[in-house]
Amino acid sequence: MKFSSWHTFLFSSSKASTVNLLIQERSRSVKSIFTVQRLGQPDITVDNGATFFDTSNISVLNATDSGTLQNYQYRVGGRYFPAAPVQCSINTGSGVSNGGAEAYVELAKALNILGDYRLSTACNVSRWACPPVRIVNTAAKRLQNTDFAYTSINYDGLGSPFVIPTRGGGDLGSQCFAAAISLETSNGIEISGLNAEEQSDISFLCGWKSGQVAVEADVPTSLECYVYYDAMIVLEENNVVKLIQ
């Protein structure tokens, strides 16, 4: 019986602007990897399911740029996936997001939904790869993690939404972003992922314009890597069950 599951690996963002995370995965068939940035500790006042594109400059009232994830890439043994880093800023070294279109295509590949117009999603440009919001008539910036608590007005020249706080009737959902990669070697019907058992290591490499910081109420963020893999239960003679993963 073939089935799929996932392993979870947790890391601290450590206020860093670049990270190189070693993922200790040894499955025989890794289908895809998803890495997200979330609050390190649950908070009853916000949406703990929000996944952040960038958390820098939250405490800076008049930042010269909005801050952004600039690029990411996975290294498996001596190979890189994809071959060139996924670009998430308008150009190399910029602090302005390009909207994360390339990153969304990689996510669609990993979820096997690329080009499937039968599907719909609540993820749109107001939520995907969005920097922290700016509250109208103030210099305050906030993470977009209070589901539908803000109404968007427009965007500043750096890509940050201008918003007005509302009481649950806003149009701006929580931020969502995932640094994903598909490692399928065929159409995915059979065991078809990358063999991590034969690789020396798997690493996630990414860089932001500015260091990721502790956010509201000094709650730190963490990086969570989810490795999606194939597994199989084999029933052998004498009713011996063997798990292959």
Image (cartoon, rainbow, N blue to C red):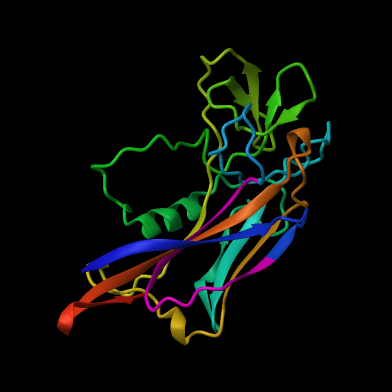
Please state, as top left, top right, bottom left or bottom right, where the N terminus lies in the image. bottom left
Name the residue: 23% across, 72% down: 190
Q: What is the quadrant of residue 46 in the picture?
A: top right
36 horizontally vs 96: left or right: left
Name the residue: 32% across, 57% down: 112
236 horizontally vs 182: left or right: left
The answer to which of 101 and 175 lies nearer the viewer is: 175
Q: Where are the magenta residues, as a range?
A: 20-39
Q: Position of residue 234 (x, y in %)?
A: 22, 76
Residue 200 is covered by the magenta coloring? no
237 horizontally vs 11: left or right: left
The answer to which of 75 and 124 lies nearer the viewer is: 75
211 horizontally vs 5: left or right: right
The answer to which of 32 and 103 lies nearer the viewer is: 32
Vertical side of 204 occupied by 118: above or below: above
Vertical side of 149 occupied by 188: above or below: below
Name the residue: 66% across, 42% down: 41
Q: Position of residue 199 (x, y in %)?
A: 50, 84
Q: Position of residue 75 (x, y in %)?
A: 56, 75
Please state, as top left, top right, bottom left or bottom right, where the C terminus lies in the image. bottom left
Name the residue: 77% across, 33% down: 217
Dominant SS in magenta: strand
Q: Position of residue 236 (x, y in %)?
A: 19, 81
